[in-house]
Image (cartoon, helix red, strand yellow):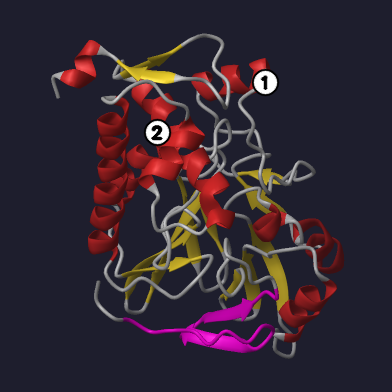
Amino acid sequence: MAEGPQYHSQPGVVQRPEPGLRLVLAPNPSPMTLHGTNTFLLGEGQVAVIDPGPDDPRHLAAIMAALGPGERISHIFVTHAHLDHSALASRLAEQTGAPVLAFGDASAGRSPMMEALAAEGGIGGGEGIDARFHPDILLADGAVTEGADWRLRAIHTPGHIGNHLSFAVDVPGGPVIFSGDHVMGWSTSIVSPPDGDMGAFLSSLERLGHEPAVRYYPAHGDPIPDPPARLAELTRHRRARETQILAALADGPSDAATLARRIYLDTPAMLLPAAARNVLAHLIDLTERNLTTSDAPLRANSIFRQTGSAKIL
């Protein structure tokens, strides 16, 4: 992938990726967030915040300090209801009077299959979910919100979580997309059912491929300078994992955790539980496509096996 601009990793310092856009990095580095959450401030004067980040008073103070004299926050946009993205939204809204805009709460946007799995229980999941998140204004797919010097369009991109939105914005150099956790340059996204949905994730990658963009601004890590190349890379990666899973199941039935240990050979032990969730998401998608099957009801430790359809692929 082509090299592009890079951020520094010092929390709280205002960075300016391009005119009309500011970035304040949250102090929440981890193996799942890299240097931390990127909180973006869009526009001048009446400013929109994209992903306020974790509920940390230091980050709240840094966001407010990033405003210039006479500026105010007019809108708070949230890509999705995970604690590292949405938890600060309510406190920022209280301090500024700005409404919080998002697709919905943490359960919004689930497919019927994921709704059924959530209702049945036993599938696990829920990592990092912000169960208290409730936006003031719901944004449907395609909804447009305008400020004095910016225009933002919501794109529903479920997969990492059902309520995930990406945001398309026109800037002087061309259209850009704030891609949240759906497309990142430094890592793939965890897809953990029932909040995550692998079939939806792949469909959303395809959907973004039809959206013009000169670069993506993910919520973790540096900007992505070649969006089509990154989308293709992520799609190839997911399809390759799918092939590995089916090949492993050709040797006999297995559960997600065992498959993850066989497939993710270079993954540190501490990240294998997340890898197992990704494998489970693939297995559920493969089952929906009649390429694998398992005994009902579906559980996190269910044993999966190939179907005859898979063996002839």
Q: Is residue 303 left or right of residue 148?
A: left
Q: Secondary structure at mark 1?
A: loop
**What SS does tag 2 mark?**
helix
Of mark 2 and mark 1, the one earlier in the sequence is 1
Residue lying at the far top in this picture: please name it.
296
Neighbour class for label 1 at 10 Å: few (<14), some, many (≥20)?
Answer: some
Q: Specify few, some or many for label 2: CA neighbours under 10 Å numbering under 14, 14-19, or 20 or more.
A: many
Q: Work out whether residue 144 or residue 268 is closer to the camera in this orientation and state it.
A: 268
Residue 1 spot, x, y in % from top left: 25, 71
Does residue 152 lie above or below 209 as drawn?
below
Give the side of residue 200 with respect to residue 209, left or right. Answer: right
Q: Within the image, what quadrant is residue 70 found in?
A: bottom right
Q: At x 48% / y 63%, what residue is drawn?
A: 151
The residue carrying mark 2 is 282
Residue at image coords 38%, 84%: 5
The residue indicated by pointer 1 is 121
Residue 261 on image: x %, y %: 45, 43
**Could you tell me the amino acid type at mark 2?**
His
- Seen at 56% across and 25% down, the residue is 301
What stretch of residues is rendered in magenta? Answer: 4-27
